[in-house]
Image: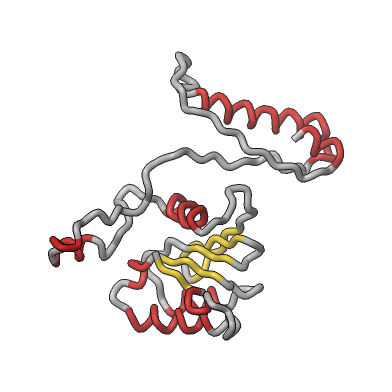
Amino acid sequence: MQQNAEDGGNRRFILVQLPEATDNPEFPKISDITRERVRRAGTKIKAEVGLTGQDLDVGFRAFKLGASNFRNWDVETDTLLAEDLEAFVDNINTNADDDGIVYEILLKAGIRLDTDLQKVSIAGADVTLAMDGLVAVSANRAITQEFIDGVLALEPPVQQLYLLDSGFGDNDSLKVNARHQFAARRSDSDPDKDDALRTV
C-alpha cells in the first residue's frame, strides 16, 4: 500500500493467517490482529499522503475457511427415498448467507479472490459481476422473468450466469427459457454454449 501511494501503482497482496487464539479480549484471534493492522496501516498511509492519496485503495476482503453453504449429497443411490429427494430440492444450508453463497460459487467457478467485483440490483435482487461483467452470480431465491430480462439487458452482455436452482421454484419453463436465452448469446461453435446459464 505504501509503494502504491508513492508511485501510483496498483499492487495487490494476499495475507494468510491461522486463527490462533490470543489472550486479548479485544482481538481474540491472531487473524483479528492482522485485520486491524491492515486497517490502521491503510488509514496512516492515506493520512500521510494527504489529498494526492484520496483515491488510494486501502480496502481489503477478509475470508475464513468454513463449511460449504451447500448441503452434501451423501445418500446411497440404492436406498434413495422420495423424502431424500425432497430434502435436496433446496440444497442450501439453513445458516448460509447470500454473500457466502456468491463467493463460494465464484471460487468454484475458478474466479480469483482478488478479482474486481461489482454488485448491482435487478428486480430487487443482488447480482455480483466479475471479469468486467462477463460473469454474473446471484443468490436470488425468487427468480422471475423480470429478473432474467434485467440480467439479459446488462452491458456488456453477461456470457456466464450462475443462479440457484431452487430460486426457480417449480417454474421449470422459466428455467428452460432462460437457458435458451443465454445460450443464444454464445457462438454455435462454442462447446459450452448450453452451459451459459448454470444452476447450483
Nearer-the-camera pick, 189 or 129 = 189
Horizontal and vertical percent for residue 192? 52, 75
Image quadrant containing the C terminus: bottom left
Colour scheme of the picture:
secondary structure
Residue at the limit of the structure toward the front, as seen here: 78
Against 29, residue 76 (above or below) is below
**Residue 134 at what x, y percent from top left?**
61, 68
Which image quadrant is residue 85 in? bottom left
At 49% from the left and 22% from the top, the residue drawn is 27
Q: Quadrant of residue 58?
A: top right
The residue positioned 47% from the left and 57% from the top of the image is: 105
Nearest the viewer among 156 and 186 is 186
* Front one among 78 and 167: 78
Q: Would you say 149 lies left or right of 57 here?
A: left
Q: Residue at x 62, y 75 (%)?
A: 157
Task: Name the spot of residue 181 as percent of width and height, x first.
Answer: 50, 83
